[in-house]
Image: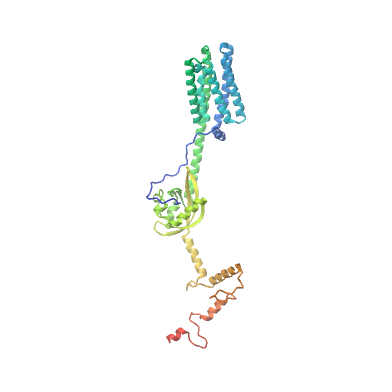
Amino acid sequence: MGTGSRAAAPGPRAQRPIITTPEPDRTPQEYVADRITWQPTLTFLHYAILTILTGTACFAAVIFWFLPAHASQAWGQLAMAGVALVGTVLLWRRHYQLGIYWMASGVWLCIMGLSAFHEGVRTPIYYALPIVVIFLGWVVGTRAALFAVGITIAATVALIAADMLGWLPVVPPSPPLLHGVAQGFVLLLSAALVIYLVQAYRERLQEMARAHEVLRQSELKFATTFNANPVAGSIATQAEGRIVAVNDNFVRDFGWSREELEGRTAVEIGLWPDLQARAQFREALSRQGRTMNHETVWRHRNGELRRISISSSTIELDGQTYFLSFCTDITTRKAAEEEIQRLAFFDPLTGLPNRRLLMDRLDQAMTACARHQRLGAPPAPGRPALHRPGQFQDTQRHAWPRHGRPAAAPGGAAPAGQRARG
């Protein structure tokens, strides 16, 4: 918490992070990975193939049986049926992306081929081109739909120009029956598209409702855990160190209210008395991604310095990085540990080092000598040669009586200080 850069002035109150992002256009491979989203589209592909096969069969039968003069248009219908059969094989082998592009491009080329060799834009099947554009926009994306619109407009302009210049072949106009069959074919495809677009939309709404419910439950669990945590917790932005949320225990331990904390940085409220320690903590947290039991000093709202143990980690919310921190006030515990240390190694009445401290230092010295293989080396200049642990205390006991007065000199002479006063 509070590991961002220093702000020049208090900024506006920060908004709580919301984990919602708009969903971009996805490729067919991404749709395949999501069964809930892809299934209606895959079902539409199956029914679209069935509609194409049925429509082309009916169209060809009407031409051969009732309009033999227009038999040349039946070959285009058979070519479209072949495209649908190849698309069926690709979908059966799970080559979804290839199958989509094959069907869209194949149907588009068949329609354009029929139009170029017959009546141009007046060809009955020409009305199916918008279905191809909508199909690409749904199952592929907006870019594919825009590309299909662009090339369709260019092809339409070219057909109109060729018709005006007389470049198209002269064929008898299509009878109303052929137009009726083509319109029925287009209406069947449109109905299938509408039905399964609505189904996909409903599936998407149900999926979004489930996702929002899961998100709401997750946020509720997080908020409950965060607020019910027995230690002080906070969430701050990584970029500025601006506090966005604190729990009740943070308010209790450090004296600031939520209104005073949220939307401000730790520097602005003076939480860190040592900015260098704050910079070191921020560097360690940014480098490692988390810190455990980092001991430092914070300032209470009343100005009192508190020793704390802080554990932090980085989290991602709504595409931004935040620091989630939990800290414990260890001021009382540290004071108790220092008191225990003092009572263990110093006399409680005089404050002088006791025998335990001496033994501890001697053990450390002997361990150091053993580590450097210098047990038999002579003592350093100015230090007594001790051959047993009690020798130093025995020497001091003879030199200084129980009450701390100097012992008499050899021969009964008084100490130098007493002779001077006498």
Q: Is residue 378 above or below residue 33?
A: below
Picture residue at 48% right of the left edge, 53% below the top: 283
Q: Position of residue 390 (x, y in %)?
A: 57, 76
Of 304 and 283, which appears nearest the observer? 283
Q: Is residue 128 above or below residue 208?
A: above
Q: Is residue 368 above or below residue 188?
A: below
Of 414 and 331, which appears nearest the observer? 414
What color scheme is it? rainbow
Q: Report the residue that reaches farthest toward the bottom.
A: 411
Count of numbered circles in the view = 0
Q: Report the residue that reaches farthest toward the left.
A: 9
Q: Position of residue 343 (x, y in %)?
A: 50, 69
Q: Is residue 176 above or below residue 253?
A: above
Can residue 198 be seen in the rendering of this structure? no
Q: Position of residue 6 (x, y in %)?
A: 41, 51
Picture residue at 52% right of the left edge, 81% below the top: 399
Can residue 306 be seen in the rendering of this structure? yes
Q: Position of residue 384 (x, y in %)?
A: 55, 76
Quadrant the C terminus occupies: bottom left
